Image (spheres, grey):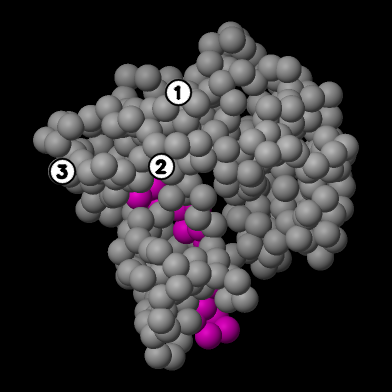
Amino acid sequence: MPLTLRRPSAPLRPTVPPPPAVMLFLDDFCGGLCHCLVSQGQTVRLGEPVGSSSCGAAVHAPISGVVRAVGSGALVIENDFQNTPDWRIEPLACLEDAEASHLLARLARSGLLTADFTPLPQRLEPCHALALAVLTQEDYLLFSALTQSIFGGLRALARLVRPRRLLLFHDPRCAPVSRAARALCFPGELIEVDGTAPQLNRRLTGRSLERGVTLGDLGCLVFSPQGAAALFDAIYLGQPHLKTTVVLLGPGGGPPAVCTVPLGTSLAHLLTQTRRSAPTVLQGVEKCGRTLRSHNAPLTKTDKVFTCLSGPALTPTGRG
C-alpha cells in the first residue's frame, strides 16, 4: 500500500538499535493480570505468547531470546538479536484473498489495545463505528511519523468488520491532520473535537459510558495513532503488538524525537541511543506528567510521551 505524503516539519525519527534485554509487565493492559506461559531458561521466539488472560488480553515476546527471570507480575527476556519469528506469524500475500474469519480471530489474540487502553474485543463483529483519535500535539507527532501504517491498518480493519461509520476525530489545533486525511483519501467523516475530548464517548455512542462498559462493548472501536499503526502489523504482517512508538520531548527547546522500539525496552536505553540526558524524566507532558523513579522503567503499550527536564532531580511522585 504505497501511500506517500509530504510533511514540511516531520519529527526526527532516530534509528534506535534493539536493547540487550526487555522487561514485560504481565498486567500491560486493563482487566487483570495475565497468566505467565513461559518459565525461566526457556527459549522464546519473536511474537510468541508469553502471557494470556480470559478477557482477551495477551502479552507476546517482542524479541527472540531466552527468558532470564520470571516474577509475579513481570518477566525478562535476553535478546539473541536473531528475531526468529514464531510459527504463528503469517504475513499476508493479499488481503482480498484471506478469509475474514481467520484474520478476525488472529486480531482478537494480538494483544492490541484500543484508545481507552482496553484489549481489542474477542468478538469484533458487529462494529458500528471505527475511529481514529488525534487529540493532542503528541498524537499529531505520532500521526505524522506513522501515517502510512495508520491509514493502512484502518482501511484493512474497515474492510474486515465493515463498520457503519468510519471517523477521524482531531483537535482543531491539529489542522494538518485533516489535510493529510484528504490527501490520502480517508474514506470517512472528519470530526473536530476539543483537545481534552471529554465528549468523545458521547459523540460516538450518544451517552456516557456506565461503569465497567467500554466502547468496544458497544461496537465502537477507537484507536490512538499507535494502536492504528499496530493494526497494520497485525493484519498485513501477522504480528501481534510487539513494538511501541513514543515521543521524546526536551530537555530545553530542542526538537521532539519519535522512536520505535520493542515493548519492554528500558527508557535508559532509549535516552542513551538518542543522546539525551536529563536528571528528571516525566511520563507524559510537563504540565501533567508523572516523575519516573528510575530511567530503567520499561516501555509499555500505553506509553506515548516522555519529557526530559533539565536542572536538579525532582522528588518522584509516581511509580516508574
Magenta segment = 245-264
Image x and y of residue 20, in percent: 22, 53
Answer whether residue 240 is visible to the viewer in this image: no
Neighbourhood count class around disc 1 (C-alpha, 10 Å): few under 14, some 14–19, many 20 upward: few
User: Residue 215 occupies which quadrant of the picture?
Assistant: top right
Q: Could you tell me which quadrant the C terminus lies in?
A: bottom left
Residue matched to label 1? 54
Who is closer to the viewer here, 104 or 151? 104
**Residue appearing at x 87%, y 47% in the figure:** 191
Instruction: Check the image and report above or below for 45 versus 132.
Output: above
Instruction: Check the image and report above or below for 190 versus 272.
Output: above
- The residue type indicated by label 3 comes to Arg
- The residue type indicated by label 1 comes to Ser
Neighbourhood count class around disc 3 (C-alpha, 10 Å): few under 14, some 14–19, many 20 upward: some
**Residue appearing at x 35%, y 56% in the figure:** 298
Residue 175: say if magenta. no
Left or right: 276, with 220 as reference point: left
Left or right: 221, with 86 as reference point: right
* Residue 232 circle label: none
Residue 261: say if magenta. yes
